Image: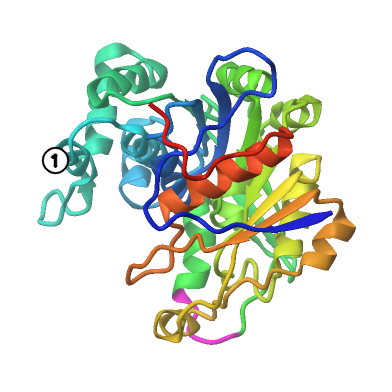
Amino acid sequence: METRSVHTPTNFEVSKIDRRSSDHAPAKLVVIGGGSGSFSILSGLRSNLSVDISAICSMMDSGGHSGVLRDAYGVLPPGDVRRCLIALSQETDLLRDLFSYRLDEAPYHGANIGNLMILALTRMLGSEEQAIEGMSRLLNIRGEVIPVTLSSTHLNAVLSTGEIVRTESDIDLRSAQCTTGALPSITSVFLDPAVQANEKALTAIEDADYLIIAPGDIYTSIVPNLLVSGITDAISRSSAPMLYVVNLMTKHGETDSWTATKHVEEIAAYAGRVPDAVIAHRGRIPPELSHSYRVEHAAQVVVDRGSLSDLGVRFVFETDVMSRTSVIRHDPRKTADAIACACGELAGKEVNLSAEVS
């Protein structure tokens, strides 16, 4: 295995990603995930004109405003779909901000405008798929947003104590409500009921030039996609290289003390294959940022390159992919550039990190 230390340009310019085949069509990238992790990746890739993006997103959210709409109207949770649509939107910041806007006052406390728009279009047009297509046109997105399934299901977690925690929101609440370091770990997750994959998701994986597993909560954002019947088989059959963007921080009750290798092992266990490349943050997270996360019993993920090599990862790309904000998040542009570099290496082509795509 080779380890690359990637140095992203000071003034970011879009890097070209080539198809693995010899034609000149845009490279087909499939991003699998949900939540803020997918949002960061898609936001960065949106401006890369050399790629055709398909975002496969989790549909197991049961908390917040998505959960309210799911329970009240019997629709699929719109939250992750909305985030992906906004990330890929080429419209003005004002329109993107509108679709992210949340009403705080009663009687609409917590209601999200974008979620309500998706609900309204679902009822007007007759299905969630048509609503997403309508929203895609309204927001003028680059690429396609694909729900991993069109069937309703709930995520369940089996704890080390044998207890089963039901629904995604209750799994998430375990960490949020824990005030001590004692919290049983998750040993496995499953869907109830079992559901079939969206055919569009299977087709996207089959046609992909590169598969990208986004960063995000392992058990509530990433693995739920892999539990949907048909997804793992499609990933296993695909000849496309698979990249995994490793989380910056651990999560209490889910990934306590996990290294990068442990993250990759768990992804591989559910995906049916080891990622060909791993993108990880290079450098120590500033103490003034990490301090607030210690209260949540979270720590920076350690990148153990040797163990990743033993696992079968072909390339490890370490670079600064963290945003310079008050929260610890992946920087969209830095991460997109690292992805471009990794794709070029996997395709056996040199990628010019300062080459602007017109």
In this rendering, the answer to whether 135 lies above or below 33 is: above
User: Residue at (14%, 40%) from the top-left corner?
Assistant: 94
Of residues 41 and 116, the one nearer the viewer is: 41
Quick one: 63 or 91, which is closer to the camera?
Answer: 91
Q: Quadrant of residue 90?
A: top left
Name the chief secondary structure element in magenta: loop
Q: Is residue 61 left or right of residue 194?
A: left
- From the top left corner, tell me how far across and down residue 235 is, in percent: 73, 31
User: At 47% across and 55% down in the image, what residue appears?
Assistant: 169
From where the camera sits, is residue 193 visible?
no
**Residue pictured at 57% horizontal, 44% vertical:** 339
Q: Which residue matches tag 1? A: 94
Q: Is residue 336 left or right of residue 106?
A: right
Give the total number of marks visible in the rendering.
1
* Residue 27 is inside the magenta segment: no
* Figure quadrant of residue 159: bottom right
Give x and y (percent) for residue 206. Answer: 68, 20
Tell me if 88 is positioned left or right of 184 in this view: left
Which contiguous range is marked in magenta?
Answer: 177-181
Residue 179 included in the magenta stretch of the image: yes
Vertical order, 107 against 151 (above or below): below
Mark 1 is on which residue type? Leu
